[in-house]
Image (spheres, coloured by chain):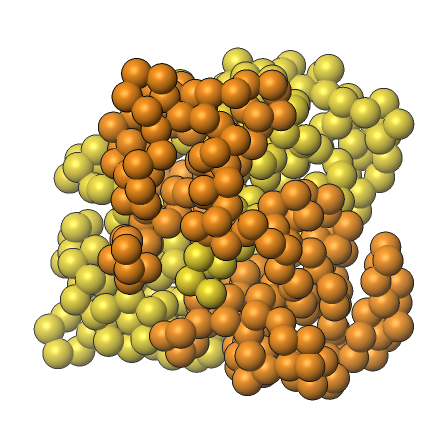
Chain colours: A yellow, B orange
Amino acid sequence: MKAEKIPDIIIGRLPVYLRALQRMADSGLKTTSSQELGEHVGISAAQIRKDISQFGDFGKQGTGYSIAYLLDKLREILKVDRIWDVALVGAGDIGHALANYQGFKDRGFRITMIFDSDKSKVGQKIGNFTVEDAEMMIEKVKAAGLKIAMLTVPASEAQGVADKLIQAGVRAILNYAPINLNTPHNVKVQYIDPATHLQRMTYYL
Amino acid sequence: MKAEKIPDIIIGRLPVYLRALQRMADSGLKTTSSQELGEHVGISAAQIRKDISQFGDFGKQGTGYSIAYLLDKLREILKVDRIWDVALVGAGDIGHALANYQGFKDRGFRITMIFDSDKSKVGQKIGNFTVEDAEMMIEKVKAAGLKIAMLTVPASEAQGVADKLIQAGVRAILNYAPINLNTPHNVKVQYIDPATHLQRMTYYL
């Protein structure tokens, strides 16, 4: 099985399956079917079976999937069977919300550093964190070997910060700044921009 | 031209083009090419030309696109040549950040109401807003004729709140709760869940 062979669109659905399966497990369910999972995530049973079968034979004909087993396998495939340390850059409103968010730790991530270039924010406490000077970012991210960062800086600063993070060894960026980033092919970027999401829906109104 | 005929994946790229074109306009540019736009958004020139040509003939062979004209057309197509009033449900950290976010108004949206079911938050001021009791939500959203809502409530409450919003006439939901919503076919949902986005990238690390 070669990683390169699985289309990115399938990879994008796996976290959604994982999330739904975790909720099923939390509610006490032990097994599920592609039909049932499909109803939870709004994806056809056939598509789910096809997606999951890319990685091996995880279900039994007639008895469906063991939720615990499928959870383990999906976590292993997505490499969230471990905890990834994450740098957060930008200590504004969204940065604060993310720093305080309790939903990362059960899903494979923890923020371990927060940076801002605004000297008035450096030294500020956010929950258990102290905001650090962005001038130290390359050095500290590199020393800690961080591969993942979240960017909540203004659009005008995002590309510059991304370039530095990449220089420091970061290979995955979750970008909240409303601007497209130019990055090398070995760096993954995901975008969160609420206005873009809203505009995608108004077309249909 | 029938709305139904344009694939959703194309509609999803239009807000990204719009955002990049707006930045070009802000920096003083008057015209652009599909090549140049492509470099800004990381999409091939051929794909951009194909996407835009779905809606008409907006460029001139050899001289490219007028940015102002293309901005107008894209805003018209996405129906953000107007301002949409939006209800925000959930006055937690993310709700606060969204209520204070300055990036909506230039892109077709303004939050006009904030609701929470937590009585200790009702009456609280967030910027210019006063948090209202979620018990009044259906009535107030219906009276105002709102079609769009943002959901920043806990996962356990999201489906119930979504059902009420739909009952009140909402047809587009931006859901920050980490759970899939079951909605009728005439209701659009977009999801923002940072852990899902991060897990989509760790696969490649």
* Rendered residue at 88%/72% (across/down): B123
> Which residue corresponds to the image point at 60% horizontal and 66% vertical from the top-left?
B149
Q: Quadrant of the N terminus of chain B?
A: bottom left
Residue displayed at 17% across by 37% down? A5
Is A144 placed above or below B81 here? above
Q: Nearer the viewer, residue B74 or B61?
A: B61
Q: Residue furthest left?
A: A61
Image position of A72 with respect to B139: above or below: above
Residue A182 visible: no
Dividing the picture into quadrants, the one containing residue A70 is: bottom left
Whether B116 is drawn above or below B96: the answer is below
Q: Position of residue B2 (x, y in %)?
A: 28, 60
Could you say which is closer to the camera, residue A65 or residue B86?
Answer: B86
Counting from the top left corner in percent of width and height, residue B29 is at: 54, 18
In the drawing, does residue B26 fall left or right of residue B201?
A: right
Residue A47 occupies which quadrant of the picture?
bottom left
State which quarter of the image contains the C terminus of chain B. top left
Please state the horizontal and vertical placement of residue B44, each as a whole percent of the image. 29, 27
Please give left or right for residue A55 compared with residue B117 in the image: left
Residue A68 visible in image: yes
Residue B144 position in % (x across, y down): 69, 76
Q: How many marks?
A: 0
In the image, is residue A21 above or below residue A201? below
Residue plotted at (52% across, 20% down): B30
